Amino acid sequence: MAAIGVLLIAVVSLPLRIRLRARSTPRGRIQVHVAAFGGFVPAICVIDSDRWRAKPKREEKDRRTSRTRNISRSLKLARQLPSLLSELIRRFRIFQIRAEGEFGLDDPADTGVVFGLLAPFVYGIPRTSGISLDVRPVFGQPCLSGRLDATVAVSPATLLPPVFRFAWRTFGPQWR
């Protein structure tokens, strides 16, 4: 029994290496591979969009709850979500990000404005950091296509404190 506990603690505390691959052409596809123990164990494909199938819709139940209660809970959740996301992102270690793509909007001026906003990210990141961004504007027609290949690592144990703080702030006791 103690061996199971030690193994569980080791799995939670050692880093997971996550590799995300996405592309939009010729057919959109997303793949996520996870390797335990910092990548020493062979990666397992956790998400593959080629395997997704449309599930039949279930019938909706008639829920009779207070509408104001649901709205206040949703607002509280929306207020706490940005802090949760920023705390979770800080826990990830980036090994490699390669992104390339093309985009265009209906108006070429709007395309230029968006590209101007993206330019500091595209050209301001040193190439030695493991992050490579290649974004090309298309002024002639509206379009969006690209590829992403990212490898990050995270220790699941480091994700627990932000998640618990978020749950406590959002669903914890209501002081009125």
Image: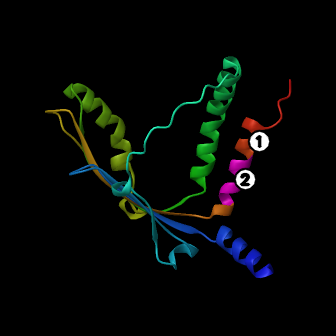
Q: Quadrant of residue 132?
A: bottom left
Q: Quadrant of residue 70?
A: top right
Give the percent coordinates (x, y) of residue 127: 36, 60
Question: Between marks 1 and 2, how big is the CA–CA gap?
Answer: 10 Å
Looking at the image, residue 156 sits to the left or right of residue 137; the answer is right
Q: Are marks 1 and 2 in contact (CB under 8 Å)?
A: no
Identify the magenta region.
158-164
The C terminus, quarter of image: top right
Between 104 and 37, which is closer to the camera in this rendering? Answer: 37
The residue beneath circle 2 is: 161
Q: Which mark is residue 39?
A: none
Question: What residue appears at the point 23 percent right and 50 percent down from the top-left corner?
Answer: 25
Question: What residue appears at the point 83 percent right and 35 percent down from the top-left corner?
Answer: 173
Give the percent coordinates (x, y) of residue 56: 43, 42
Give the percent coordinates (x, y) of residue 162: 69, 49
Hey, which residue is sitting farthest bottom in the picture?
3
Q: Is most of the magenta stretch helix, strand or loop?
A: helix
- Element class at badge 1: helix
Whether residue 34 is visible here, answered yes or no, is yes
